Amino acid sequence: MNDHTFRTAMGKFATGVTVITTMIGEEAYGMTANAFMSVSLNPKLVLISIDENAHMNQYLQQSKKFAVSMLNADQQHMSAYFAGQIKEKQNIDFHWFQDMPTIKDAIAAITCEVDHAVVAGDHTLYIGRVTDLYLRDGEPLTFFEGKYRTIAPSVVK
């Protein structure tokens, strides 16, 4: 199989959209990611996957902590901005939580300390020990087949 076919197959898996953030000194950094999952309930662990060439990889190696903001259905702009699809610099008004920048109005956000980092192919997998979280009501922003989506209510017959 070629890379295009593999990427197309992986795009068949619908995911939520997150923004990963961290702090280096007084500077906040963020990137959009859909490679996020829970790993363990006890202890509470999550995993994020970061491309080896992404600046965020260097930031996480330095800071050893991160936050994950799970975007709501109305936050496609935030996703596009942190994915680098919007080029002009914007002043992001973060919601500060446990001294970490998170995305305002996200349906959930968690803060983590890096527990393990494992290089796997062209990505580094960061396993984070969850230190705190908050929740809000709302619908998630999702991604499927290379496009943003929202979840339609199910109709049970």
Image (tube, rainbow, N blue to C red):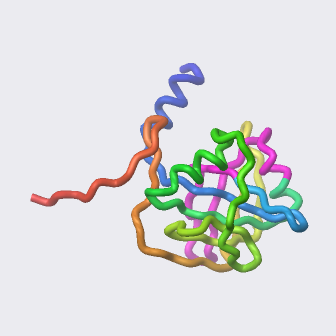
Q: Quadrant of residue 112?
A: bottom right
Examine the structure image and report whether residue 114 is included in the region drawn in magenta.
no
Whole-percent x and y of residue 44?
A: 61, 74
The residue sitting at 76% across, 70% down in the picture is 113
The residue sitting at 59% across, 45% down in the picture is 80
Nearer to us in this view, 153 or 14: 153
The magenta span reads 31-58
- Give the quarter of the figure containing the N terminus: top right
Nearer to us in this view, 155 or 64: 155
Examine the structure image and report whether residue 45 is included in the region drawn in magenta.
yes
Indicate left or right for 70 with 91 as reference: left
Whole-percent x and y of residue 145?
A: 44, 35
Relative to 34, is 108 above or below? Answer: below
Q: Outermost residue, top direction?
A: 2
The residue sitting at 45% across, 51% down in the picture is 142
Indicate left or right for 63 with 82 as reference: right
The residue sitting at 69% across, 51% down in the picture is 31
